[in-house]
Structure formats: structure tokens, C-alpha cells
Image: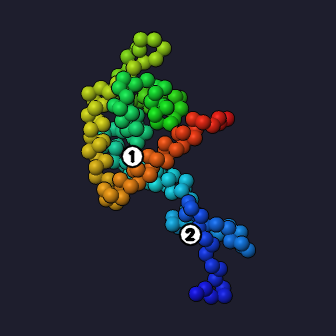
């Protein structure tokens, strides 16, 4: 039972956020249990990226460069447009990462048939770095296979929904 000094907690909406209290406006949360999904995703991603970056220094990579190596391995041969689309980043942002990975010997670039683009492939050094990075990532703390599979499925669904929304709506 609430004492006269305590205001009852407002009900939660379907996304887990607290709704506005009828007489006191929006109630601010004190912790992750009350945060909106977008903040949970952002903070989880930052913490994950921080852990990964600290460990990938051993193989000369960052989380961003690992994402590119994984995408190149998936699409080989790849081009900048296809990689940027897959990773949801601009071609300009991707270009600097590709140039760094190429200079470090992780990627090879060959002129494509149309001469405007380059085919991008992993080198042996890139394949070795990717394997070493994957081995390091297996040491990452996790909550267990069942929870991880559930989260993976939900994130995949979320990504598909957002990509479909973007495909059908124009943005400035």
C-alpha cells in the first residue's frame, strides 16, 4: 500500500515505458527496467562495442573494421555500395574504413568489369584476422544460449521491420 507521500507508479505501455501520471506529468525512470527500447538498444550496443574494441586491439581491428571484414566475407566479391547498404552506413564512412583495412593488408581491391567500382575481397591476412577476432568474441560474456537466441531473433525481426519501413517511406 502506498503512503500518502508516495505517488503510485504509472502504468506501463506495451514497449515497457512508463506512461504519464495523470496529475504529475511524465515520470522519469531510475533504471533500465523503465527505459525506452531505443535507449536500451543504444546502451547495449555501446557496451558491447566497448568490450569488443578493447579485445580486438590484439588483432589490429576495431568493431567497425570487424563489421566490414565480416560483411566482405559474406558478400565476396563485394563493392562499397553493397557493403554500405548491408551495414546501414554511408559510402563515405565505409570508404575510410575500407581504405584503412586495405592499407593494413586485410583487404584487396580489384577493378570490377564496369571500371567504376572495385571488387573487394579478404586477403589471407584479413581471413586470419577475422578468424582471430571470432575466436576472441567467443570469450565475450553472455547470458546463455537460450537468452541469446531469443534476443537474436527479436533483433533480427526488429531490423527487418525497420528496413521494410524505410523501403516504403521517404526520408529527407
| Image x and y of residue 20, in percent | 67, 67
| Image x and y of residue 103, in percent | 38, 26
Q: Nearer the viewer, residue 120 or 2?
A: 2
Report which residue position mark 2 lands on. 30
Q: Nearer the viewer, residue 120 or 143?
A: 143
| Image x and y of residue 110, in percent | 38, 16
Q: Nearer the viewer, residue 93 or 41?
A: 41
Q: Which mark is residue 53?
A: 1
Dot 2, how many residues are within 10 Å of its Cα: few (below 14), some (14-19), or many (20+)? Answer: few
Q: Quadrant of the N terminus?
A: bottom right
Residue ID at (49%, 42%): 160
- Residue 63: quarter of image: top left
Q: Is residue 17 above or below residue 22?
A: above
Residue ID at (66%, 85%): 5
Mark 2: which secondary structure? loop
Asked if the residues shown at circle 2 and circle 1 are in contact, with their CB atoms under 8 angstroms apart, the answer is no
Q: Quadrant of the C terminus?
A: top right
Report the side of 169 relative to 161 (left or right): right
Is residue 96 visible to the viewer in this orientation of the structure? no
Residue ID at (38%, 55%): 150
Residue ID at (57%, 41%): 165
Is residue 151 visible to the viewer in this orientation of the structure? yes
Of discs 2 and 1, which sits in the foreground? 2
Mark 1: which secondary structure? helix
Amino acid at each position: 500500500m502506498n503512503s500518502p507521500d508516495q505517488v503510485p507508479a504509472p502504468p506501463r505501455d506495451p514497449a515497457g515505458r512508463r506512461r504519464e501520471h495523470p496529475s504529475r506529468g511524465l515520470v522519469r525512470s531510475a533504471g533500465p527496467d523503465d527505459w525506452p527500447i531505443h535507449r536500451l538498444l543504444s546502451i547495449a550496443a555501446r557496451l558491447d562495442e566497448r568490450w569488443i574494441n578493447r579485445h580486438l586491439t590484439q588483432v589490429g581491428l576495431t568493431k567497425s573494421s570487424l563489421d566490414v571484414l565480416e560483411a566482405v566475407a559474406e558478400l565476396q566479391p563485394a563493392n562499397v555500395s553493397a557493403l554500405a547498404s548491408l551495414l546501414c552506413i554511408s559510402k563515405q564512412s565505409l570508404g575510410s574504413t575500407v581504405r584503412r583495412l586495405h592499407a593494413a593488408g586485410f583487404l584487396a581491391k580489384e577493378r570490377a568489369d564496369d571500371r567504376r567500382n572495385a571488387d573487394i575481397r579478404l586477403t589471407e591476412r584479413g581471413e586470419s584476422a577475422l578468424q582471430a577476432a571470432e575466436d576472441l568474441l567467443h570469450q565475450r560474456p553472455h547470458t546463455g544460449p537460450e537468452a541469446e537466441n531469443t534476443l537474436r531473433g527479436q533483433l533480427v525481426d526488429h531490423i527487418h521491420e525497420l528496413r521494410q519501413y524505410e523501403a516504403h517511406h521517404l526520408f529527407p
